[in-house]
Image (spheres, rainbow, N blue to C red):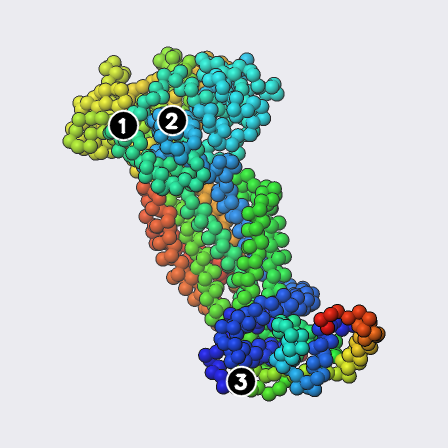
Amino acid sequence: MLTKLEEQVLMTVWRFKGEGYGVNIFQYLEEINDKKLTLGVVYDILERLARNGFVKTQFGSPTPVRGGMRKKFYGITDNGIRELIKSREVYDRVMDGFNELLDQQRPEDV
Amino acid sequence: MDIDPVKNRPPGFARWLLKRFRNDIRHESLIGDFDEIFQSKIDNEGILNAVFWFWLQVLRAIPGFLRSSIYRSILMFKNYLKLAIRNFQRQKGYGLINMTGLAVGIACTILIMLWVQHEFSYDHFHENKNELYIVVFSNGSETTPPPVGPYLKAEYPEIKEFARMAYHSAEFDYKDNSIRIDDGKMVDPAFLTMLTFNFIKGSAESAFSQPGGIILTETTAGLIFGIEDAIGKSIILNNTEDYTVTGIIEDYPDNAELKINYLLNFRKMKDYGRDLTNWEVNYHRTYVLGEKNIAIDEFNSKISDVVTIHKPQEQRTMSLRPLLDQHFEDHSKGLVYAFSLIAAGILLIACINFVNLTTARSSIRAREVGMRKTVGGRKSDLHIQFFSETFFITMTSVFFGIMLSILFMPLFNQISGKQFDIASFSNGQILAGIILVTLITGIVSGVYPALFLSSFQPVKVLKGNISLGQRGNLFRKVLVVFQFSMSVFLILGTMIIYKQIDFMKNRDPGFSKENILCTRIGSRLRSQYEPFKNELLQNPSIIAMTVTNCPPFRYEWNLGIGDIHWKGKTNQKFSMVMTTVDSDFLKTFDMQMEEGRFFSPDLPTDKADAFVINETAKRAMELDSPLGKQLRMRLITGRIIGVVKDYNFESFHKPIEPMVMKILPEASDDLCIKIRPENTPDTIEYIRNKWLEVYPEYEFSYYFLDDRIRQEYSNEESVADILKYFMVFAIGISSLGLFGLTAFTAERRKKEIGIRKVLGASTSNISIGMTNEVIRWITYANVIAWPAAWYVMKTMYLNNFEYQLDIGIGIFIFAGLSAMAVALLTILYQVLRSALKNPVDSLRYE
């Protein structure tokens, strides 16, 4: 079962369609969560996802901007997509009836 | 983005940390990502924010990194351990050489560690150890005037308490039991609470509430009272004084600077007629208890002239010496350091064996390294692998080293004079030391081989066309030379110490020390001395006898240091050693007069007011014609009737000091009897019988002066004995390494030697070829060790002696040749084996 942050990372990898690497994944995650994250944590999750076969990695070619350091691009695998589907189903079941409930009891500022 | 990559680099250290901890993935992309975000932060938020962000990211990332790398390490460690064991099994011979060397080196280190720890533990058992001081004078003397303690306590708020301590020894009488006990101390009651004593019966506060109390150690109480309960019993000391046992203490620890068998109240001094308010005399030690953390140098400058205020003629300044420094006043701290260094050296020799054998045999491991690298092993993985192999061997060696040290403990105790047993290991410092030694040994032996082996390039080693044995050859040679210089150094050091001891033993001390029997006498014999002496002298085997306070080389009994006053050119007073004698002293010890005459038994005035001084005193007093000059010592005034030729009355460590002699039978406790060398047992039996007529209840105990003088060097001799073992170990371990190395070389050159033989080389040609190199190594080792040993022994050891040995070239040559002989013997087997081998065997291809 994926954790919430794992879901987010995996979804982001998918979203970038193989163009995602450390920097843009990290920045996108900071953006959608609207808070500062730790790059190392994101890396740990990417590593774990790769170990479990949910993402695959590929090295790009060195660029001068990064001092000759290559980028490592991440792409989602079929297994990753299946895992996301499972998460999505759970999420849907958890959120079932959300709007009705919200109508019955809505906080004033929302 | 337009970025100057050099100017705006992320903080180097943080970046390094990142690389360090992120060793589990190809960190290149990660670092690149970090750098990229860092650069964009510089553009958007400025350099400071960017650096801050970078650091924060790295620090927050570390825990996660650590977790993943530890997980990986455990996984790999199992694999490494298995490999280490397999490698050891495959090469048992070399592994055993490595382990034996390391185990012996570690055993030496452990024993020395125990010794060093014990030396530094002296007087640390006192609860007030850091606040206790001894009053000393600038000339090193610890005997002080009695009022010093009270004065310091009254005048200086930093001093909380004082206690005076005088030496005492006595005959103890209880019922029919009579025994002489030395190492008693007379102390102020405060002594019992300032220092730490463990009372079994009685208490530190109450034991000395009466002046007639005596405190005994358990052992002393056992000697006097046997199994009886001692407390409250009365005993008689020296036939005259009554004491009541008011306390029993545990035996005083052996790591204390003082030896204590019993304690008396210092107030008794008054009964001996001593004036405890007199600043003119020096009787005893003064201990003081200070406030915590006194700035001792500052305080010492305040009290330096305390004695001079009360005694204007005092030239020496006074100061406080921490009690914890006291042990090293007469035990060389240098020796402790020297031994530690030597132990470290032996361990280093053992580590060198490890390094040499591992790198020499690198060709065996080279393919493995190549394979590992080809399938993706990183250099750091290989480092860890080789390190864990080294640590595996080190740990096993430490285990055997501890076993060995326990095995050798009795021998070590015998030569070091200490009492170690297995329980000595249960000491925090020792355990920490062993762990530290393990780590250091592992690192020292592991670093170079790990770097060396992991640096092979897979392409080259897998092709198999580089001669791997040649790599690091020079380094190995240097290490072998180092090992043997260390061995030669130790041979030289040991020999120089033995020679110096020999030199001192054979040196003429200025008196005849042979066939002189000494014993201590009590007051009863002192009063019957003349008839006793006349009776003894009737035996033709007894040549002469004398009473004195200080037989030569027993200077520790010499209590009489006093101020001498005279009328002379300059310098009209200073302290001199006083030896009390009688008129037969000169004859008994066969000494010579320089001028004038010695005391005559026929002139009663000689006993009353005559002094004899030694040559050194004559020079020190700057008297051209000393005879008839007036002297005053303490309250005795007299004239000089003669000058005795200088003789060594202390030891050969020290120069002869100015001395004055005086007839003073009541202060003379030592009886010295010169006997003929023939029929010694009969003569001793005769003396014993006469002695028992005076003291029927005493055992007659005696010693021979020359034995005692020999004991003077027992300290040096035990140092030399320890060094001797070190030397043997150093040579042994070096040879072991050399053996392994030669065996390997011989194996590697098998084919070469085979071809040489086929081409007509004789056995001797080949042997010489193989030996030459070793001869060259040992020669270099000697070239290094000779000057080093000469310099070190001269400055650190021989200069401690007033009378020094002339180091001849002989021992250098001897040491060099012995090292050479040992080395050649070591390689002999291998050389002969390869030289005699049938070339067919070595050249045949399977």
Q: Which residue lies at the image location 55% right of the left edge and 47% below the top edge?
A: B429
Left or right of B67 on screen, residue B548: left
Q: Are marks 3 and 1 in contact (CB under 8 Å)?
A: no
- The residue where tag 2 is placed is B150
Judging depth in this view, the residue of A47 and B844 nearest the camera is A47
Q: Which residue lies at the image location 56% right of the left edge and 22% below the top edge?
A: B202
Image coordinates of residue B229 in percent, x first then y, are: 60, 19
Amino acid bearing label 3 = Val
Judging depth in this view, the residue of B453 and B12 nearest the camera is B12
Amino acid bearing label 1 = Lys
Against B714, residue B348 (above or below) is: below
Q: Secondary structure at mark 3?
A: helix
State how far apart marks 2 and 1 are (Cα).
16 Å
- The residue where tag 1 is placed is B311
User: Which residue, as the protein is rendered here, is positioned at the far front?
Assistant: A108
Q: Which residue lies at the image location 32% right of the left edge and 37% below the top edge?
A: B302
Amino acid bearing label 2 = Pro
